Image: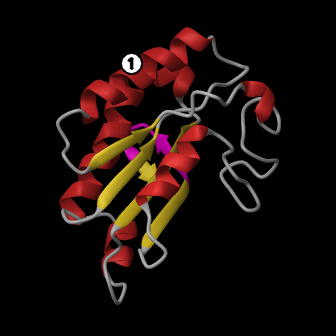
Amino acid sequence: MHSEFALIRSLAHLPRYIIIHTGTNDLRSEQERVGGLVCRVAERATEAFPNSKIILSTLLPRKDFHPATIQRVNADITRGCALLPNVHLAHHSTISPHDLYDHVHLNKHAGSTDDVQLASPDERVIKSLLSPTDSFLEWSGLEVKGSKCAV
């Protein structure tokens, strides 16, 4: 089990919801593998937390890649996660590269989501799943690098 999952499992109580926002620095060289690698993160999360709902954010559009490339990877993620019963995908369809800090990253500190809010209908859907007493864990800035995942 990866250290990030071990850390989460050490919490006093397990979260009902885990939100995973993914990004990749290897999209150019790993286009064919990225969707599968992101799905593997979701699989590991479901193995570690079978009673939690996993909300997995698909890749955001980027100015440095053709939209069809992002759509292809997101289609791979959708197909790969379809049979995972506790995984729900957040497809930020209303976000464009122009909504991002540098047309690629959420903010100027790549990998950090401090003071960032994803303004989309998907956020409202996610929030509607949560009650005020729900516990959830947000993983932001999770990067897929080859076959490894780093927080």
Magenta run includes residue 37: no
Please state if 39 lies on the left or on the right of 103 as rendered.
Answer: left
> What amino acid is at disc 1?
Glu
Q: Which residues are magenta?
A: 141-148
From the top left corner, tell me how far across and down residue 130 is, in percent.
44, 64
Quarter that holds the N terminus: bottom left
Q: Indicate the quadrant where residue 129 lies.
A: bottom left
Question: Which type of secondary structure does the marked residue at label 1 adopt?
Answer: helix
Q: Position of residue 106 (x, y in %)?
A: 72, 44
Residue at x-position 26% and y-position 54%: 44
Residue 146 position in % (x across, y down):
42, 37
Residue 113 image-quadrant placement: bottom right
In magenta segment, residue 143: yes
Disc 1 crowd, CA 10 A, few/some/many (<14, 14-19, 20+): some
Q: Image point 64% across, 16% down: which residue?
A: 65
- Residue at the spot 35% in from the left edge and 29% down from the top edge: 77
Figure quadrant of residue 101? top right
- Residue nearest the observer in this picture, 7 or 95: 95
Q: Is residue 122 left or right of residue 96?
A: left
Q: Is residue 84 visible?
A: yes
- Does residue 44 lie above or below 72 as drawn? below
The residue tagged 1 is: 32
Residue 150 visible? The answer is no
Does 151 appear above or below 14?
above
Is 113 or 51 nearer to us in this picture? 51
Magenta part mainly helix, strand or loop? Answer: strand
